[in-house]
Image (cartoon, rainbow, N blue to C red):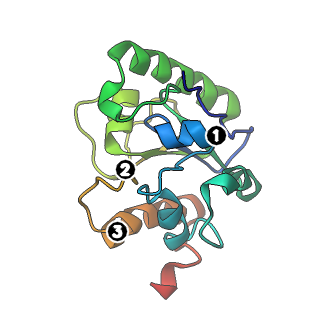
Amino acid sequence: MLRPIKDHLKPGLDIIFVGFNPSIRSAETGHHFANPNNRFWKILYEAGFTPKKFHPQEDILLLDLNMGLTNIVPRPTKAADEITKEEYKEGRERLIRIITELKPKAICFVGKGVYLEYSGRKKAPWGRQETPVVPGIIEFAAPSSSGLVRMKLEEVVGIYKELPAILYGQASSKGEES
């Protein structure tokens, strides 16, 4: 049986990125967003979060940039549709505990479906959410980085670029280059 992968978290982070759950490839390697078809690391770089395109095995380096990684459900699966309602419920409760305890400035949900499962809402816009589940925390719904997402990469990156502007009141460092 494949094991969950380690969260990369610490108190006071600027952003915690929250995925659905680890892919089989991530579970095999022990690193977040390790599936070669996943565009997470490319999106982070192009949106200005990282100074270079990280490889999955460099996921721990996000902590040095004051960003963390976790998933709403720790169990690895081939696809998110294998996650049970009970796992989502437990994951939601776990995330609320993590957020309350670690007090990050923002939570970026890597996939609107992740945010909807977390918030219990039926729909949500892209970007900053008006009423956070945990008061005082910026909640940001971003497109999934999965290669299965049909949105153009530029459009996805554009949505992710909104988060540094909200957090730091300015465009991301790479923003002017695009």
Cβ atoms at labels 2 and 3 below 8 Å apart: no
Q: Which residue is mark 3?
A: 153
Give the structural element (helix, strand or loop) at label 3: helix
Above or below for 90 versus 38 = above
Picture coordinates of residue 108, whole percent (x, y): 49, 47
Q: Which residue is mark 1?
A: 30
Give 162 or 56, whichever is nearer the viewer: 56
Q: Could you give the CA–CA distance between mark 1 and mark 2, rounded to whole angstroms?
A: 20 Å
Amino acid at dot 3: Leu
Q: Nearer the viewer, mark 1 or mark 2?
A: 1
| Crowd around label 1: few <14 · some 14–19 · many ≥20 (10 Å) | some
Asked whether residue 126 is in view, the answer is yes
Give the structural element (helix, strand or loop) at label 1: loop
Give 40 or 34, whichever is nearer the viewer: 34
Asked whether residue 136 is in view, the answer is no
Amino acid at dot 2: Ser
Total tally of numbered discs in the picture: 3
Picture coordinates of residue 21, whole percent (x, y): 47, 34
Mark 2 and mark 3 lie on one chain; the one further toward the N terminus is 2
| Rendered image: mark on residue 144 | 2
Q: Could you give the CA–CA distance between mark 1 and mark 3, rounded to whole angstroms?
A: 26 Å
Which picture quadrant has residue 97? top right
